[in-house]
Amino acid sequence: MTSAAAPEAIVVGGGPAGLMAAEILAGAGAAVDLYDSMPTIGRKLLMAGRGGLNLTHTEPLQAFCRRYGAQAEVVGGWLDAFSPDDLRRFASTLGIETFVGSSGRVFPTGLKASPLLRAWIGRLRAAGVRFHLRHRWIGLTADGMSCFERPDGSRHQASAGATVLAFGGASWPRLGSDGQGVAHLAAAGIAAVPFAPANCGFDVAWSPAFLARAEGQPLKSLALAFQGQTARGEIVITRYGLEGGPLYALGAALRQAIATSGRACLLLDLKPDLTTENVQARLLRRGSGSLANTLRKQLGLRGIVSALLHELVSPADRADAGRLARHIKALEVPLCGIQPLARAISSAGGIDFAEVDADLMLRRFPGLFVAGEMLDWEAPTGGYLLQAAFSSGFIAGRGAGRYLQLIQE
Ligand SMILES: Cc1cc2nc3c(=O)[nH]c(=O)nc-3n(C[C@H](O)[C@H](O)[C@H](O)COP(=O)(O)OP(=O)(O)OC[C@H]3O[C@@H](n4cnc5c(N)ncnc54)[C@H](O)[C@@H]3O)c2cc1C
């Protein structure tokens, strides 16, 4: 427990970023009050747990940092301070062991978020952190106090030596992070890039006949390409278009193209381990069988691929082995839209990095720190989102502790 005279800190937002900031501050001896607008905290973390909770990734740090695109350098600094290994050790201190799954992703052995969250809340309470739920941060008063609104409309004001805001992004708003906190900061003069969907599906105007055959079907072992970027894996055909990990990896460039011109031409390589010449040679063994049979027997491509080629390739090109081989190696899929923010796994946009110093303190509001997805970075799925949320929470918590002079260099 902290003493009554301990310097006070406020943390707003009980997601991984805010909880990590609270952890660091309480560990340094601050009396921490944590506020959240929802009746319970960590709802997005729990939702991530439904997919097994991909906490982080084991790829080398340089490659890891490149996942953050334009913000690779700044996020790299966070990872230097609180690395993927640190995150695994941290989970272990909560009694949660982790394992490395397929393609280097890291998961808790129980593949759930609830044991980690439960143990963490217990430890924070034991360290004296006080939780104030159903308190929505709605801005700062003229003298710099945090102003909260409760569900009955009543207001509460609180001040502290240092405050960490960790509102999250703006996807899945029903889980608590709805972008409103950033809007309040923007109204106070803080520059913010509008939130946009990231790690989300894209729209394709499929024909009803194709959808009847293909909706919900996976396209496996593909390579996707757009503007020189490539990603491999599996995508799924949906009612509205396409969804899946490799698509998310190309998502930022696809989103920008659609925002600029209303469309983007995604290229699918349906046989990435064969050359166009190999594919053509195998197609020439067709004989009198159907195209679907040839694709299955000669190239190991399932019926759904044949349906996709019928949907997107003209009959003349399907009948010509050379042209069909080129389509199989670079099938053009016209994307005509992007799924809405409410259905995206994460969001791009948020507080502009020009507004914060290396400790993630807002330059215009000394003592006010920001962390997590509410900052203007984005990354694909694979554990990169949670890692950056935890690491930035560490940076902001440590910065707030330094500001309170609890943490020395
Ligand atoms: C379905 C799904 C699956 C995911 N799976 C993974 C995964 O496996 N791996 C991965 O790396 N990432 C995953 N993510 C993304 C990851 O969960 C988020 O990037 C991460 O939770 C962001 O952490 P955060 O602390 O910044 O924000 P959040 O976790 O969103 O927490 C923000 C908190 O702030 C509170 N809040 C917001 N505004 C206010 C306000 N004005 N006043 C008071 N409180 C407020 C919210 O209620 C919330 O509790 C997934 C996301 C979704 C939606």
Image: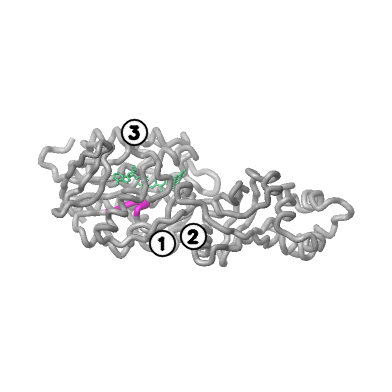
Foreground mark, 2 or 3? 2
Q: Which residue is pictured at 43% across the width and 56% down the height?
A: 196
Looking at the image, can residue 83 be seen? no
**Disc 2 or disc 1, which is closer to the eye?**
2
What x and y, as percent, mark residue 297?
Answer: 80, 49
> In the drawing, does residue 357 fall left or right of residue 217?
left
What is the spatial separation of the Cα atoms under label 1 and label 3, in whole angstroms? 32 Å
Identify which amino acid the numbered label 1 is placed on: Ala
Measured Cα–Cα span from mark 2 to mark 3: 35 Å
Q: Picture quarter containing residue 268?
A: bottom right
Q: Which residue is mark 2?
A: 252
Q: Nearer the viewer, residue 263 or 28?
A: 263
Magenta stretch secondary structure, dominant? helix
Q: Which residues are magenta?
A: 370-374
Q: Which residue is mark 1?
A: 72
Residue 124 lies, in percent from the top left, at 27, 37
Q: Earlier in the sequence, mark 1 or mark 3?
A: 1
Pinpoint residue 109: horizontal percent, then vertical percent.
47, 36
Q: Which mark is residue 119?
A: 3
Question: Depth check: 232 or 149 in front?
Answer: 149
Name the quadrant where ligand 1 sits.
top left
Q: Callout 1: helix, strand or loop? A: helix
Who's the residue at 18% across and 35% down the image?
A: 1
Q: Residues within 10 Å of mark 1 (few under 14, many from 20)?
A: some
Query: Can residue 372 be found in the magenta stretch?
Result: yes
